[in-house]
Amino acid sequence: MARFYEYQGKELLNKMGIPIPKGRLATSPKEAREIAEEFKRPVVLKAQVLSGGRGKAGGIKYATTPEEVEKVARELLDMKIRRMPVKKILAEERLLIQKEFYLGATTDPSSRRPILILSQNGGIDIEEMARTSPAKIIKQQVNILRGLREYEARDFVRKTKGLSGDQIIALGSILKNLYDLYRKYDCKLVEINPLILTREGRFIAGDARIDIDDDAIFRHPELGLASTEETGERPPTKIEIAAGKIDEGDYRGTAHIVQLDPEGSYAKEKGKVPIAFDCVGTGTSLTTMDELVELGYFPMNFADTSGNPTASKLYRATKIILSQPGIKGYLFVSCVSSQQLDNTARGIIKALKELYPRTCGKPNIPMVFTFRGGWDEEAISLFEDHGISQSPWVKILGRDATEKDSAQAFDFLYQEWKKATGGIKN
């Protein structure tokens, strides 16, 4: 899922005819001050991070004078919100609010149809409101083949109370444009929270959240998005962006790679040994990870190279996974499946030989390879034929090994490696 920053989402809203506040992006306190001097009015400063709950975390602040704006901007740019550093600030005119609405379009998984969501209680957590006050939220499914008509949008808006005729027309038009944006860009979610009704009687998008389906990114090159796996409420790393290109144009199997601890800070904080990791099958990945954590290790990444991918995909995936800085070991574990593991082995071996050319692929960190399933004996033979099995820091396991066996074998190998090298790569 690709998620836009607020300022990017508002650019798309504006293109679709939905009013947004006057505002500009600032990357320094000086820029923020210049924007305030240009606006000549109070502003709101918003930290640009891919995370909800900015307001509660202190990421949204108000300022009146250019001097105050510069001071507040400096404070925001020194912040981290959910471990994400604030590098950009959106400086906008401060609106005089009469009322706040919630407006959204997403997919209803139960009916597999688009659904519109509207509430006159905007500005708060919609999930919490749905749990505590469901009557304050109205919803309507949309026929995806026919789309949303203007009159249908107005009829939906009329279900709310206390709106004038002009307000119904204006809000209906915004709802129609929001749905059109949702469909045009293959969105998973589009929401405006709050949609502000100003004291002058205008509807303006106070915030914007837009999430786009990863599998549709290739259809929208104009957005400049990189194809990656879901990374939650943070931007993708360079490694994840590189991994996202592995499946481009070749859908034989898949290479799913996400960094769990991009900077290694979590492993360091918990006193765990950072390692790289790849598995065939998500279940095998999760089970093996559980075993490793119990023994004092923390996988820097999650990976699943399954569905019978080509050797070239394993080659690229292995090089990307092993490029993570600070790793002190690597595990590959396959589930018992029909995946053609000899091709898997060929890709891994090619990557190892390029990464360790002086030793013909023999690594300088402990590595365990567990091959179980189709062509597993051939995969093991390939490691022997290329001499990699003879490395003191390589252990090969076969179809009788369990996930626990793999983790324990790695632990034993790591301890031997640490005694011999002091934990330093040679």
Image: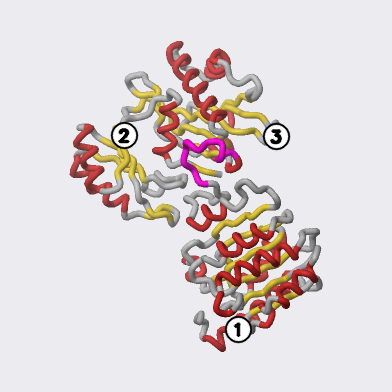
**Helix, strand, or loop for circle 3?**
loop
Where is mark 1, residue-wise? 415
Q: Magenta stretch?
A: 216-226
Q: How far apart are marks 3 and 2 (CA)?
A: 39 Å
Q: Where is residue 389 in the image (x, y as percent from the top left)?
A: 69, 79
Seen in the picture, residue 232 relative to 62 is either above or below; the reply is below
Q: Residues within 10 Å of mark 2 (few under 14, many from 20)?
A: some
Q: Quadrant of the N terminus?
A: top right
Seen in the picture, residue 47 relative to 289 is either above or below; the reply is above
Where is mark 2, residue-wise? 23
Q: Where is residue 4 in the image (x, y as percent from the top left)?
A: 46, 41
> Which of pointers 1 and 3 lies earlier in the amino acid sequence?
3
Which tag is nearer the camera, tag 3 or tag 2? 2
- For the residue marked with disc 1, what is the amino acid? Gln
Where is mark 3, residue-wise? 110
**Helix, strand, or loop for circle 1?**
helix
Q: How far apart are marks 2 and 1 (CA)?
A: 56 Å
What residue do we see at 47% from left, 66% from top?
265
**Helix, strand, or loop for circle 2?**
strand
* Left or right of residue 249, residue 73 in this image: left
